[in-house]
């Protein structure tokens, strides 16, 4: 007669990387899993420029999400460096999530990335169908089949293929008062975001927690603040302008002589563009656009820092900085 001894499941911790062509929903998915904004989002491609880590805490695991720029055909030195960031990250993570939008057929960009992923043999790969809230069930089914075929064609054995909608998950959480029980608008997709974490965790190595409880990202606050300003600056500008915008926080200090119960943080930041003709676009008539950028970004910055802030923004020209190695270094790339 044998005596059964149930031992608790081992704690797992490790890194997962979301890859995909630009604007495939990687940053939105990262934010949905972490439960707060740690990666900026935009309808423009090449929004993400820094590798942002979002940390998902669970009793049995810690999932560290690495958000990378979209892999793309580079046209500038900046583009080449962004692609280098992606490939370096792939070599360092425990699992790769390949994001493919449900509302767009698999194209050359997706195939290009999948071909590169096929060369990485040891790292488990999960295919994630994003933006499922934008399609009907028939279109979604066709996309799932196409992804399965793509894997077989290139010799990729998907550990999982899972459809999610990070946007619908956010809607469901708001409607349910912070819960995601699966009821209400977007409830199914909200559950799928949680299920994605369930599927990624077993692919991680056995390990104690890598970050303290409560940490949501390891990005320095100044980098996060700069990214929030850039996100606000990207809204409503011309198609060619987003790639020309960089933000550097020059100074971020608590204001002296403030009472302890009324703190204020002074933030001085520069918004850099490549040509003088772009300056008016960012500033707007009589400074209206720049003021809107300040108001919108300050709201998110105050939520991030947990304190009121005074935000001082200036727009400066750094001619052709995307192609200049010295200026790229100065702007943090």
Image (cartoon, helix red, strand yellow):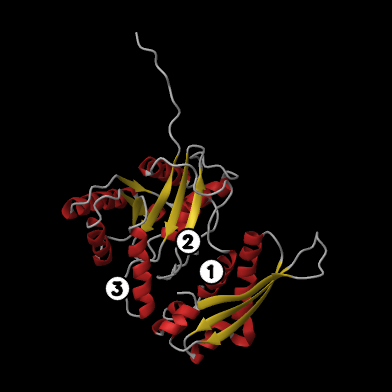
Q: How many marks?
A: 3
Badge 3 element: loop
Picture disc at residue 127: none
Which residue is at 41% across, 70% downward?
A: 46
Q: Secondary structure at mark 1?
A: helix
Q: Are marks 2 and 1 in contact (CB under 8 Å)?
A: yes
Of the image marks 3 and 1, the number of the one nearer the N terminus: 3
- At horizontal 35% and vertical 50% (from top left) the residue drawn is 95
> Closer to the camera, 34 or 82?
82
Question: Viewed as shown, does residue 227 lie left or right of 131?
Answer: right
Task: Assess disc 2: are there few (<14), some (14-19) or many (≥20) residues with their C-alpha within 10 Å of its C-alpha.
Answer: many
Of circles 2 and 3, which is in front?
2
Specify whether 115 is left or right of 286: left
Label 3 sits on residue: 73
Q: Is residue 238 visible?
A: no
Q: Tell me the residue that label 2 is attached to.
A: 52
Which quarter of the figure has residue 205?
top left
Please tell me which residue is depicted at 56% across the width and 86% down the height of the picture.
Answer: 316
- C-alpha distance separating marks 3 and 1: 23 Å
Q: Name which of mark 2 and mark 3 comes first in the sequence.
A: 2
Which corner quadrant holds the C terminus?
bottom left
The image quadrant where one finds the N terminus is: top left
Q: Which residue is mark 1?
A: 227
Q: CA distance from mark 2 to mark 3?
A: 22 Å
- Whole-number angstrom distance, CA of label 2 to CA of label 1: 10 Å
Residues tagged 2 and 3 counted as in contact (Cβ below 8 A): no
Residue 302 coordinates in the image, percent (x, y): 66, 63
């Amino acid at each position: 007669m044998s005596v059964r001894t149930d031992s608790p499941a081992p704690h797992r911790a490790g890194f997962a990387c979301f890859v995909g062509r630009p604007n495939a929903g990687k940053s939105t998915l990262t934010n949905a899993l972490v439960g707060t904004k740690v990666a900026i989002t935009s309808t423009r491609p090449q929004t993400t420029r820094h590798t942002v880590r979002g940390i998902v805490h669970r009793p049995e695991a810690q999932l560290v999400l690495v958000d990378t720029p979209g892999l793309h055909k580079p046209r500038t030195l900046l583009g080449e460096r962004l692609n280098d960031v992606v490939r370096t990250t792939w070599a360092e993570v425990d699992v790769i999530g390949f994001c493919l939008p449900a509302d767009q057929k698999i194209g050359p960009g997706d195939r290009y990335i999948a071909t590169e992923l096929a060369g990485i043999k040891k790292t488990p790969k999960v295919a994630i169908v994003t933006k499922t809230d934008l399609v009907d069930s028939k279109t979604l089914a066709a996309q799932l089949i196409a992804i399965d075929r793509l894997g077989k064609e290139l010799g990729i054995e998907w550990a999982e293929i899972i459809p999610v909608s990070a946007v619908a998950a956010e809607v469901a959480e708001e409607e349910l008062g912070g819960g995601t029980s699966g009821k209400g608008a977007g409830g199914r997709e909200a559950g799928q975001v949680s299920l994605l974490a369930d599927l990624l965790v077993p692919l991680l190595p056995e390990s104690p927690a890598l970050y303290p409880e409560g940490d949501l990202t390891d990005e320095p606050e100044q980098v996060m603040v700069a990214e929030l300003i850039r996100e606000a600056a990207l809204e409503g500008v011309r198609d060619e302008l987003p790639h020309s915008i960089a933000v550097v926080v020059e100074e971020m200090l608590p204001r002296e002589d403030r009472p302890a119960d009324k703190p204020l943080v002074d933030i001085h930041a520069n918004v850099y563009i490549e040509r003088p003709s772009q300056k008016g676009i960012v500033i707007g008539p009589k400074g209206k656009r720049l003021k809107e950028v300040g108001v919108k970004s300050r709201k998110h910055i105050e939520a991030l820092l947990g304190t009121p802030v005074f935000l001082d923004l200036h727009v400066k020209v750094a001619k052709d900085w995307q192609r200049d190695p010295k200026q790229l270094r100065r702007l943090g790339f």
